[in-house]
Amino acid sequence: MKKTLLVLFAAMLTSMFASAQITDTIVSLTPSNRNVVIEEYTGINCGYCPDGHRIANEIMAAHPDRVCVINVHEGGYAANTFTTQFGSALANQTGLTGYPAGTVNRHVFTGSVTDLNRGQWASATNNMLGTASPVNIAADGTLDWATRTLNIRVQLYYTAAQTVTSNALNVAIIQDNVLGPQSGMSANPDQVVGNQYAHMHMLRHLITGQWGETISTIAPGTLVEKNYEYVIPEQLGTPNAIEAVLENLQFVAFVCEGHQEILTGTHIPVQYTNLPANYGRVVSLREGTNITCDNQGNVYFELKNLGSAPITSITYNYTVNGTQSTSTWTGNIASMSIGNIEIPTFDINVNANNNISAQVTTINGENITTDAANLTFRKNVYTGGGRMLFKLVTDRYASETTFKIFDPNGEVILSGGPWPNLASNGTTIREFEFNPSTTGCYRLEVYDSYGDGISAGTGNGYFQLFNENGQQIFRNNGKFGKQATYMVDVAYPAGVEEFTTETVIYPNPVSDVINIKTSDNVERVELYNMQGQLVKVEMNVENISVRDLSNGVYMLKLTTDKGSSMHKIIKK
């Protein structure tokens, strides 16, 4: 690592600074408020930590140019995975007593420690963003793709006097999209990729060492420039090294009073140089809409263009439950941008886990094989019909819960919530009659605005759907994160009235002809498959042939002069 220092002194007289010749100054010379650095202490075995990740992400998204997040994997919950040589010392000075914990600019807001719980981060951030900073900061850099050489320039400009005699400049390397396990990941579904968790803002290295580089000249009117050169190794982190994926690395610079009080900080934009012409990486494989009642699956993968030329064509392999296929794509993905590649629909197993993988083999006609991305997903499809009962058991925070039921045309026919919260942990039973007016594919969506489902420790919530005979069609245990989706294939609509006259349908199961025995006058006999499609109809008959139908389950609708009834038929 090479470092250079440029210090311009102009604190003696303001006019002296005004006349100084300053070239290529990227830092503001106007006094400004502090930017914020949130350091979150976390671990893969911490069930509530994904909720902390979500909160920190939302704070950063609300102030994208002024808030930086650094996730420090440390402590018993980290289980020595993703930790670094720096985390223990950082955590020890916070006074933390539980996880997830965090500091906002390492500032003491109350008491004597910097540790804050996740519910305090937003207000603490707003406090810091409104506080004047004695120093401004700006930075930029380049990263040579071929040599992995990073060059970073950081400029500081001091606008006000301090009670301390020196500061410390810190430059951190953090990494996004590190796939791995994580307890409680459903609380932050945006970072769930299949059955793994995409860890973000993960601390991997401090270029300037444990506590930064000392800046000894901090008088008002002083401009400081620091330059760092660092060759990024193939792996980062000590003692637990992981692959340093160049395009997933981010860089943060911040200024401290000693080891504590962060005065301000900034993200460091880095420009890539010496990129190959054609190159890319499959970032993730994700589930598509999948809102039909058939056995078709829909997924897509995110391809990041890491080459200097636009990606206009690719060839890729995809594997579904062990069966591999090949497909091609054409389009345009600009350099350092991400494009979504939709895989052709394929057959899946409904109500079961399906294992999918995708791997690019050529880019712009050049043989380039990327690492494979993997996804496990489940499509929930069930059969119902007639008057059904939707039972929703909400937890304490019912104000976070809502639901919608959509008809086959995508129109909402039933919805509910939000509702008032309970005073303490517990559940409330809520029941809704679901009366489909037509056959077809209906969709049930249950939402939790907080993102931790309805069974996360404040009441064991769940939801169920029952058919008109009181039999359970399906049940969800309430641990679904932000949203759960179920498809219901309605074989016959509500409103069909049973009549009291004795009716016998035989034989059942049947292979040739169904016979109907009733004392009433038969007007119409209809047969529906389990997709709700009318496959056969006869008028004024007492038997109907099924020889030409495929084996399976059908619904027979019998209409007489006394009313209508539905009967389940098995063709063998």
Image (tube, rainbow, N blue to C red):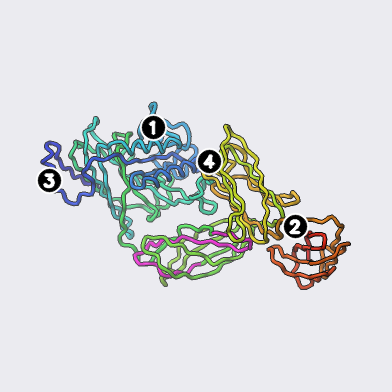
Q: Does the stretch in magenta take in 87? A: no
Give the quarter of the image for residue 222.
Answer: top left
| Residue at the (47%, 38%) spot, across then down | 100
Residue position marked by numbered label 2 in the rendering: 496
Q: Which residues are magenta?
A: 289-316
| Residue at the (42%, 41%) spot, across then down | 72
Q: Residues within 10 Å of mark 4 (few under 14, many from 20)?
A: many
| Residue type at tag 4 | Gly
**Residue placed most toward the observer, 219 or 73:** 219
* Label 4 element class: loop
- Upstream in the sequence, badge 4 or badge 3? 3
Q: Does the stretch in magenta take in 308? A: yes
Q: Which mark is residue 483?
A: none
Q: Nearer the viewer, mark 2 or mark 1?
A: 2
Residue position marked by numbered label 1 in the rendering: 114
The answer for how far apart the CA atoms under marks 4 and 2 are is 48 Å
The answer for how far apart the CA atoms under marks 1 and 3 are is 40 Å
| Residue at the (22%, 35%) spot, across then down | 160
Q: Nearer the viewer, mark 3 or mark 2?
A: 2
Residue at the right extreme of this rendering? 519
- Upstream in the sequence, badge 3 or badge 2? 3
Q: Is residue 529 above or below residue 253?
A: below
| Residue at the (63%, 48%) spot, across then down | 476
Residue position marked by numbered label 4 in the rendering: 47
The answer for how far apart the CA atoms under marks 4 and 1 are is 22 Å
Residue 39 location (% of width, % of height):
39, 40
| Residue type at tag 3 | Ala
Q: Which mark is residue 20?
A: 3
Residue 23 location (% of width, % of height):
16, 51
- Upstream in the sequence, badge 2 or badge 1? 1
- Upstream in the sequence, badge 4 or badge 1? 4
Determine contact: label 1, label 3, CB under 8 Å: no
